[in-house]
Image (spheres, rainbow, N blue to C red):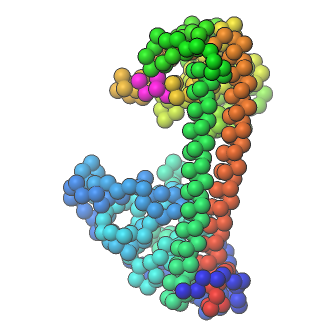
Amino acid sequence: MPSAVMDDGVMQDSGIEWIGAIPLGWRLDRLKDLVSLRDEKSTEKNEIEDYLELEDLEQETGRLLSVRNTLNVGSAVIKFYKGDVLFGKLRPYLRKYHLATFDGKCTGEILAFQPEKIVPKFLLYFIASDGFIKICTAMSYGAKMPRVNYPKQLALLPVCMPSEQEQQAIAHYLDQQCGKLDAVIAIKQQQIKTLDALRQSVIYQAVTKGLDATVPLIGSGVEWLGDIPLGWQVKSLKRLLEEPLKYGANEAAELEDRSLPRYIRITDFNHDGFLKEDSFKSLPFDKATGYYLKNGDVLFARSGATVGKTFIFYGEDKKACFAGYLIKASTNRYLVTPEFLYFYTKSPVYVVWISSIFTQATIQNIGADKYAYLPIIIPPLKEQQRIVDHLDQETQRLDTLKANLNQQISTLQAYKKSLIYECVTGKKRLAGYA
């Protein structure tokens, strides 16, 4: 099989903006003229693990994450067969696709194409290409659950068609190159997991054992906390606050007036715990009163997918207020600094406490009544500040390494998308075909 990629040869205008120029000799066919859409349904329930939901398809790689059975499926499912190309029509921007290696069944949110006049693996790469995904995303309808329609939209989309031999060569080449890129990406993702584990270990050691390994340890009085340094204490969160824990305002986020107090919701924090500027909402002064934040207030999420997560507010006093799914903890700074409390909630001991709450509750909801009794290990104030300074430096160093790895991954993923698009549209040709 040819493996070398060379610049394009003689090109012709495809007449399709998102495809651009294609090689002379290539043609465009509609998707519906190249494949048949599987529509055979099944209501049979069994323990055989041959059923796929959208969640079982890994984003951007075409790999399966898992396979399940149909025992708990409440509606009819679609049958697919080995060699079919599967494509997630719901939220097409998630880039979920797969070349079936077995006969099975899938949710109706996955379209199963039976390739008839196109090489299956070439079709897989074509629907994985950036141009195809972007046009599907642009055509999708529905505000909350956008999906693309097959007979009226997808079926009519043009597909680039080189010769069958060149389709096979392109698919083989992309298998090799994408496999190499995916392997490098996987290594970097594992390095990120290692950094995350190291970050947790550094925080755990500092907030539970301190920075001086020569200090004797004593029992904490809490079995799952273990031993703590001599001179440290364990106190409930409520005994470390200058005022009781407080729920936020139950108001709709409708205004975007920057002259009013910012209205902070769970969704306003990014994955690093910092406020996002592109999601600014505000509340009128009369509705914000009673819910103002001070610099250094720690916010606890009380329900939903983010339950247990914490954020620290940095900003001017009374310039922001907070929403009802958050709980505000204003620390007594003679007892504990807000930064130490925040780092403590990023340690594994906090995760253990959260897990213990979940095992006692039927739903994942942690109210102020439970957060009030969160056990906190408290060093002397000067030691707290030394720990915070140390953790600021160490976590920043680890976060910088992680950011660099994420940037490298983004660059590799962008190159992979570009490579697939250029190969399946003929912008790059394999040696021997140009």
Q: What residue appears at the point 52 percent right and 79 percent down from the top-left corner?
A: 172
The percent coordinates of residue 390 (x first, y second) are: 71, 26
Image position of 12 with respect to 212: above or below: below
Q: Quadrant of residue 193?
A: top right
* In front of the other: 177 or 420: 177
Image position of 109 with respect to 21: above or below: above
- Find out whether residue 354 is within the magenta segment: yes
- Bounds of the magenta span? 351-356
The percent coordinates of residue 165 (x first, y second) are: 51, 89
State whether the magenta stretch is mostly helix, strand or loop. Answer: helix
160 lies left or right of 369: right
Q: What residue appears at the point 59 percent right and 26 percent down from the top-left corner?
A: 205
Quadrant holding the C terminus: bottom right
* In front of the other: 314 or 354: 354
277 lies left or right of 49: right
Image position of 376 with respect to 118: above or below: above
Quadrant holding the N terminus: bottom right
129 lies left or right of 50: right
* In front of the other: 168 or 399: 399
